[in-house]
Image (cartoon, rainbow, N blue to C red):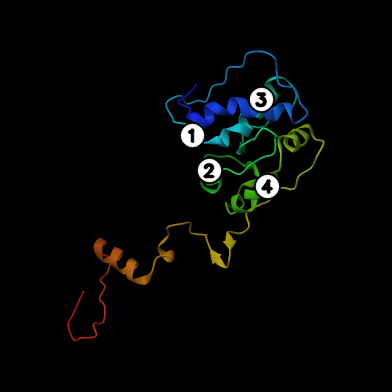
Amino acid sequence: MGLADTAVQESKERVRAAIRNSGVEFPMRRIALSLAPADVRKSGPAYDLPIAVGILTSTGQVPEIDKQSLLLGELPLDGKLRSTQGILPMVALGKKQGFTRAFVPTIKAKEASLVHGIKVIPIDSLTEMVEYLRGEKNIEAMNGERNRIYGVSFIGGAGTRSFRCPRTRAREESSRGSGSWCTQPTDGRTSG
């Protein structure tokens, strides 16, 4: 329920197989899943992990996870967690909405940890997630990597004025009336 695209609708079979292949039981009863709010479109396989954990929680196989935890990741049939596109913006939005932890595929954990102020917990598989939730395995959380990668600071966030070339910045300021710009013509004409 709730405007799910094809990938989300197909997650039913992926999640069922992933649960069975992860050493836990898939319930042999009908399951109704609500992806609220119903008027917001859901797309992509990033819902697989939260759906699987929700099923396991509802059947008492794992303890309930706190409401400040964000779960993201695609589950293929073998239960290993796959990366999904858009992890960084999803974690950033989750942080903005009050989430304090994010469970993400290990391959995307470093990227997700660029979001300062949210603990990122790298997960390899549904089995590892189950062990973590049951307290059988400890996984060290990654805290924001102080927003530095490849020597470039992302503190201001993507799209900040400091990432634009000086000429583009000057044009933007000039269009807002907060300054003017001109170039030095080489042929004696003026420009601006």
Residue 125, visible in the rendered structure: yes
Mark 1 residue element:
loop
Circle 1: is it few (<14), some (14-19), or many (20+) Cα within 10 Å? some
Q: Amino acid at mark 2?
A: Met
Mark 3 residue element:
helix
Q: Nearer the viewer, mark 4 or mark 3?
A: 3
Instruction: Return the x and y of residue 41 as percentages of the image width and height.
Output: 44, 31
Instruction: Return the x and y of residue 56 as percentages of the image width and height.
Output: 70, 25
Q: CA distance from mark 1 to mark 4?
A: 21 Å
Q: Amino acid at mark 4?
A: Thr
Q: CA distance from mark 2 to mark 3?
A: 25 Å
Earlier in the chain: of badge 2 and badge 1, it is: 1
Placement of 70 over or under 12, stated as above or below: below
Q: Nearer the viewer, mark 2 or mark 3?
A: 3
Asked whether disc 2 touches disc 3, contact meaning CB atoms under 8 Å apart, the reply is: no
Q: Which mark is residue 43?
A: 1
Earlier in the chain: of badge 1 and badge 4, it is: 1
Query: Which residue is tagged 4?
Result: 106
Query: Which residue is tagged 2?
Result: 90
On the rendered structure, is 16 left or right of 10?
right
Instruction: Return the x and y of residue 61 as percentages of the image width and height.
Output: 75, 24
Instruction: Return the x and y of residue 176 as percentages of the image width and height.
Output: 26, 61
Earlier in the chain: of badge 4 and badge 2, it is: 2
**Residue at point 56%, 40% (across, down):** 98
Q: Quadrant of residue 133?
A: top right
Q: CA distance from mark 1 to mark 3?
A: 19 Å
Q: Amino acid at mark 1?
A: Ser
Mark 2 residue element:
helix
Q: CA distance from mark 4 to mark 3?
A: 22 Å
